[in-house]
Every structure is written in C-alpha cells, then in structure tokens.
Image (cartoon, rainbow, N blue to C red):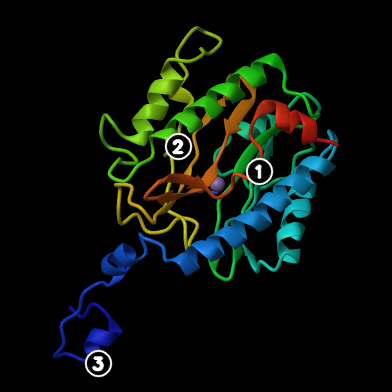
Amino acid sequence: MWRTSVERFAVLHDYANAATPIGRLRVVKSTAEVVLITKATDASVLAHKAAWKAIKPGQFEYQVATEMTNVYFEQGCERHAYPPIVGSGPNSVILHYMSNKRRMDSGEVVVMDVGAECSDYATDITRTIPTNGKFTPRQREIYEIVLGAQKAAIAAMKPGIRMSGDATSLTQIVRDYFNSHGKDLHGAPLGKYFTHGLGHQVGLDVHDPEAAQTIQAGMVVTIEPGLYIPEENIGVRIEDTVLMTENGPKVLSAGLPKEVDEIEKLVGK
Ligand code: GLY
Ligand code: MN
Ligand code: MN
C-alpha cells in the first residue's frame, strides 16, 4: 500500500515524517525570533490597552474585539495569531468562546484573549477586566487567586522544570495554589475550576509543536492559569507570553498591567 504520492514516484527512497525533528528545532528561539515575538506582543499590549480605555457596559463583545484587532493591524501585524476571544459574563466561563456577539452588562467580567501575528510570529495574551471598571468583591477575590497562582508559576520557572506531568511541575504549583486559596459557593476547593493546560510554546504558531515538556533557556511559553465558575458567571484567565532566559523568566507582555488597582485605574478612562 502506497502511503503518499511522493513515495509512488520515487520508490527507491526511504521516507520519514519530518514533523518531529522540525518541532525540536523550533523549541529554542533565536534572538531574531524573540525580536519578532516581542513585536507581536508589543502591538497586542497596545490593543488591550486601547480596548480597556474604550470599553463600556452596553457594547457588544465584537466591538471590543474590533477595537483591539484594528490596533494591531495598524501596528503592521498582518494576522490574528488566533481568533479573538472576548467573553463577558456567562461567556467568560466558556473555553474557546469566539462568537463575540453578546451585549455586555455592567457588573460582569470580560475575558479578552487577543493576540497578533506579526511577520509570521505569534503572541498570546489574556486579561480579564470588569466591564464597568470596578470588580465586585467576589470577582476581585477570584481574580487575585488566579493572579497569585500565575505569579507562583512564573516565579518557579527555571531550566529543567516541567510544564506538567510530575509533582514538581508548574501545573502542579498552580493546581496546589488553587486548592489552597478560596472556595466555591459550596465550600469546595477551586482546583476543579481550572479546566485547561497551564501553557504552551509560542512561535511561528500560537501553539508551537510540543516537542519539549521541560522548560529550557530560549523557550517562549505562555503561563495562563484560569478559573471558570459557571454558577457565578465568573471566568478569569490571566495569560502572559514569557521568555525563559538563563537568568530567569522574562515576561514579554509585562507592559500590560495585571494588578487589580492598575486595571481599575485604566478601564473605561
Ligand atoms: N489563545 C489561545 C490560547 O490561549 O491557547
Ligand atoms: Mn495560550
Ligand atoms: Mn490565549
């Protein structure tokens, strides 16, 4: 049985799938690649900031998405790194929500997972903000827990640590943090509301090939913990794109604030 048309035309050759070795070549980024990921990141940071300024309850999610994507296209980025996600209220708890068609209400949070691709290189950034510029006490509590978990994971990043898969991994740090901070409305720990992976490699694709599970200097990864609590219509994800250096993690998207006070100072103003 012939496997490919190439094999049919050149029968005396051996064939192997190049995806795995090429994936390995993509794990550690060159300086030039980091420059391009940084360009995509900087443009996306501007996009998030523009949306924070313009956002008002009563707008549609797609208006926010358009505001953002216009900014990075004007910055010279040619594509979305992935379809923009702007999910408010009940949509904030839906992973991969992309229809962006709901009218946002006051008193809700909105998850904005929006990033550009510039010169073929991607970035991946999420922030969660209150539509009316002020978190409710409960939203703030959940937000602070996600932020604390994200800071714990970034602080633990070093060459040799695993993203997931063992008891000392970054994922385990986040899961332990969630299970030891806060509770749901029934008194249960929050870990079960963290329903996706902690992160992935970023480069030519927003999800670069997962050729390495162990963090190495020169890798660019996302750190994106989240809690999604449908009963409360509260979904919070905080996602940064991070370069691992020999001297520690460098958060490429650090120009976009994530402290509650900073967000409340900027949203709607
Ligand atoms: N924006 C896609 C992701 O966070 O993986
Ligand atoms: Mn991501
Ligand atoms: Mn994302």
Is residue 53 shown above or below 236? Answer: below
In the picture, the quarter occupied by the C terminus is top right
Q: Position of residue 19 (x, y in %)?
A: 31, 68
Q: CA distance from mark 1 to mark 2?
A: 16 Å
- Kind of residue at disc 2: Ile
Q: Nearer the viewer, mark 3 or mark 1?
A: 1
Query: Vertical placement of 128 versus 141: above or below?
Result: below
Q: Say if 145 sits above or below 251 in the image.
A: above
- Badge 3 crowding class, 10 Å Cα cut-off, few under 14, some 14 to 19, many 20 or more, is few
Amino acid tagged 1: Leu
N-term mark: 3 or 1 = 3
Is 23 left, or right, of 232 in this rendering? left
Residue 239 screen position, x and y as percent: 55, 41
Residue identifier under label 3? 9
Residue 65 vs residue 258, the one in the foreground: 258
Q: Quadrant of residue 147?
A: top right
Q: Amino acid at mark 3?
A: Phe
SS for tag 2? helix
Badge 2 crowding class, 10 Å Cα cut-off, few under 14, some 14 to 19, many 20 or more, is: many
Place residue 198 in its image quadrant. top left
Q: Name the secondary structure under disc 1.
A: loop
Residue drawn 30% across the image and 53% down it: 212
User: From the image, which quarter does the N terminus lie in?
Assistant: bottom left
